[in-house]
Image (spheres, grey):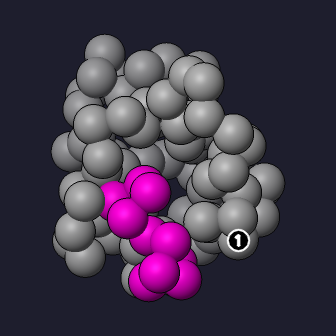
Amino acid sequence: MLRVKVITILHLVDVLGSRETVLEVPEGTTVAGLMKLLVERCDPAQAGQVFADSEGTLQPSITVMVNGRLVAFAGGLEAALSEGDEVLILPAEGRG
């Protein structure tokens, strides 16, 4: 198992349940797999603010960074996570 820190801000704290949390995920878990795990933990009434569906597909307004790099430039959602990674989930500007 890997320990991964998930951090968020603004209204997404309410959606995801906390500003920071450390999750244990299986070896080989991808960013997409982490998103699916997070949607399963969310209040279904609020999940739509982050996720477009129950598979963890992100809303277009959500930005994800892994260790300070935009996930789009770090292997995309299929990039495998490593022990100690920090995943930052950000809302679109102007929300809060």
> Which residue lies most toward the right here?
19
| Rendered residue at 49%/29% (across/down) | 92
Q: Is residue 95 above or below residue 8?
A: above
Horizontal side of 54 relative to 40 (left or right) equals left
| Rendered residue at 49%/18% (across/down) | 69
Hey, which quadrant is residue 51 in on the image? bottom left
Toward the viewer: 57 or 76?
57
Q: Is residue 45 magenta?
A: yes
Where is residue 77? Give x, y as percent.
26, 42
Where is residue 94? Give x, y as percent.
60, 24
Q: Is residue 11 above or below residue 71?
A: below
Examine the rendering and report whether any part of residue 17 can be seen. Answer: yes
Within 10 Å of disc 1 (Cα), the crowding (few <14, some 14-19, many 20+) is: some
| Rendered residue at 37%/65% (across/down) | 48
Where is residue 27? Give x, y as percent.
40, 65
Hey, which quadrant is residue 4 in on the image? bottom right
Q: Which residues are magenta?
A: 42-51
Amino acid at dot 1: Gly
In which quadrant is the C terminus drawn?
Answer: top right
Q: Main secondary structure of the magenta part?
A: loop
Q: Is residue 2 magenta?
A: no
| Residue denoted by label 1 | 17
| Rendered residue at 44%/70% (across/down) | 47
Q: Secondary structure at mark 1?
A: loop
Horizontal side of 14 relative to 24 (left or right) equals right
